Amino acid sequence: MDEGPSSVDEIVVTASRIDRAGFEAPTPTVRLTAEDLSVGARPNIAAALNDMPQFRATSSPQTTGTNTGAGNAPVDLRGLGISRTLVLIDGRRVSSENDLNSIPSILVRSADVVTGGASAAWGSGAVAGVVNIGIDRRFTGAKIGAEYGISSFDDAEQKRFEAAWGTDFLEGRGHFVIGAEYLDNEGVVPKISRPRIGRWGQVSTNDGTGRFVTVPDVGFANAAYGGLIMSGVLSGKAFNPDGSLRDFDFGQQVGTSTVGGEGPSNDDLSPLVTPQQRFVAMASATYDVTDTLRFTADIRHAKMWNDYIWFGDHNRGDLQISIDNAFLPTAVRDAMTAAGETGFTMGRFNAETYPRIDFERVTTQATLALDGELGGGAWRWGAYYSHGEFENNIDTPGFLLRTEYAQAVDSVLDPATGQAVCRVTLTNANSGCVPINLFGLGAPSQAAMDYVTGTPQQRSTTKLDVGGISLRGEPFTLPAGDVSVAFGVEARRESIDQTVGELDAAKAFRTFSFSAMSGEFSVKEAFAEVLVPVVRDLPVLNNLEFNAAARISDYDTTGSIWSWKVGATNEFFPGFRGRITQSRDIRSANLSELYTQTTTGYNNINDPAKNQTVYVLNNGGGNPDLTPETADTLTIGVTYAPPSIPGLNMSLDYYNIKIDDVITTIAPQDLVNRCFNGNAALCSKIERNAQGDLIRTMSTYVNLAEYQTDGVDAEISYAAPLDRFFPEAPGRVTARLVGTWVNSLTTNDGVSEIQYVKSQGYSFGLGVPEWRLNGSLGWKGDVFGANLRARYISAGDYNSTIKIVNNHIGSYTYFDLGATADLTRFGAQGVELYANATNLFDRQPPVGSLFSPYYDVIGRYVTIGARARF
């Protein structure tokens, strides 16, 4: 029979609370070592995990996005959303939720990925699975490292430095370890620095079929640098920097877009990859109070910060200019007078006031834990408490103030002085208004720009308090072996306090503002799990075990809800095992989903009702009436490790996840599509003007009817000394092939069902490829080592939810190459040099794949570095 642990060292089985040595949970688990995670020298753990086929990156492999979420590095199993993948550190929840940028890579021992529901074991949020980061708490000695990286475009320059130190104290009863890393990445600015990314977009074919086509060099047709006259006798004229006029080159005009010509675009200025700096540190101390009682204390601190250009606050054909405007050039006024006009409409690309984001995200979490034994090791107990705080502070200077801008634009000549003043100043001398000249790039004075712009501000603190007590052991023995149980209680409280600037609170900005948010929830939980060995050492039933778990979660917002799991494993013959689980998993709404006030953003929408692409305001927000979502998850699989071939392991698993009452925001494009398909309820979240043009969408959180996915995961790995094949050959070889086939990924709003498999180029949709494969081959000797990896993505579409003429994306294979050299033999004890090249052959991404979740938008990226251990 299996023996229980003989010390208080914790055995973490990520898919289960049972900690019996040798126990293999029935839920599929993928284990990645620190060496596995280092392949490709990715900038964070999330980026390394996103190379695995079970994950969907929320953006490209290198970037964390360029919106207000910049600096985060979440993971998303199955493409079901980052809120459905639970991230743990050594089995405990982390503050800042799903953000692996806040964990120092140098202390990471492993990452265990549960690719199935695990709510009964770990609680809400584990619908798609769990990522458990294991920390090397027993590291002894010191190690340092330095790394430099740059792309084939000579940008995205990155510098990273790391260090760790560990030592025993108090005659070996205690151990202390600390690790830290600093990263500085200059990003990729602007988007047009990649020829297949910036200024690509979809425009209508205008052939009456409702189809769109993806084309390059797309810009605004209703705005120009310095101003574009949109009505009257001078319509189509643009202002030069000196105020004179020119004919605006529209290229091919399609609705409000230009193809070719001189139409401006945010892509001309805003970044593709966010510049960012990051500092992360973690310290851990353990102390054996007695031989059966251990005390652990951890503290983790992370800070991410930088600033960069964001998106412009432009006038898209909505500026009203009067003939008596103080700055209007004489030639323009004369032409209007001759035509009998008193004003015109203008569009302006306001490059002089281009907003920036200045962000700072700070995470601090401290944990205290006690682990002990009872009954000579037959029972193990643990208790812990953790407090974490996550600060998200953002300033975005450069946004236009609604009232001040309108008053400054409405300028006239003061009859008394002949000087330009705001019209409001004629009746209110103390208005403080500064008139603004908008006729020509660079025309606005600095004083006017200071008057008409402000800084949206957000200060947010999210707090996590979580604690629990558990007891694990083997209460009795059956003929087939020990029965193992685990049970315990946990409590968690999460709160958020988000304040905004006075101007945001007053809704003083014309297009964008932050919203205040405040709220909290608490949950009390009890769980139990049992492992029963049923049959052992019989033909076909060599080791049949039954596993079951249940959890009751009592939320002060939505009441009580159950989650459960039943499963079984069996060894049919030596090395060949089968496993099956059926689980009911849950996820309660998080703080943002419950309490977010109105958010503001803009999206390009392909409008099937008008057959045109439009740039549309989108308002989001929370919903305190959300109900918990429930998921039914089935996994069936086999593993095989043939005794006759040591080092060979194979697994094959089918998964089926069906989520009801899905908590989600419906993407603006999907809102429009579903309304067009007949969902009248969702049409209420879309606004059109009198002409039927789309002017606003509202993507607040809702409970959608159903979210479903199913597919197959497969893995084969092999490791052996090279002399097994070639006598006296040095070193050890490793090979691994991991693949995922997705049969379906659908959402159903009760009226229409949308299939997202193969819809894989659109970053803000839900699409996943049908096939993803990751194969690697490595060799490591006493001095040198090398590894080659291939990442395959099957063919699909850019976005299958809309009709695009050139929608198809062919299959892609990326190659990554790495090499190491241990210099110990050359007198540099403990020193290792390494180099990596990802996207080795510089494969260009599909056209228009901005922030692609799968395709490499950076190009070949080379890193070199050195590590030393003492």
Image (cartoon, rainbow, N blue to C red):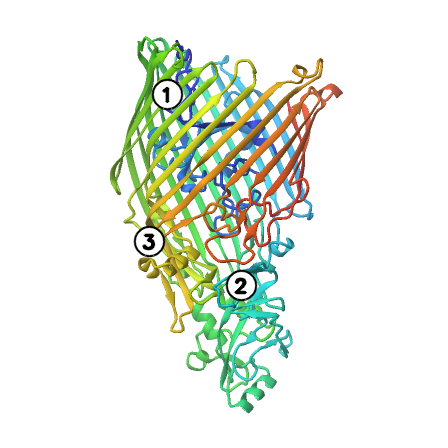
Q: Secondary structure at mark 3?
A: loop
| Mark 3 or 1, nearer chain start | 1
The residue shown at (62%, 66%) is 260
Residue 749 appears in the picture as rendered: yes
Camera-side residue of 827 and 114: 114
Using residue 306 as the reference point, say whether residue 384 is left or right of it: left
Q: Hey, what amino acid is under mark 2?
A: Val
Please identify the quarter of the rendering in which residue 327 is found.
bottom right
The residue shown at (63%, 69%) is 261
Q: Hey, what amino acid is under mark 3?
A: Val
Residue 41 appears in the picture as rendered: no
Judged from this view, the residue extending furthest toward the right is: 826
Q: Secondary structure at mark 2?
A: strand
Q: Secondary structure at mark 1?
A: loop
> Mark 1 and 2 residues: CB-CB less than 8 Å, in contact?
no
Percent across and percent down for residue 27 are 40, 27
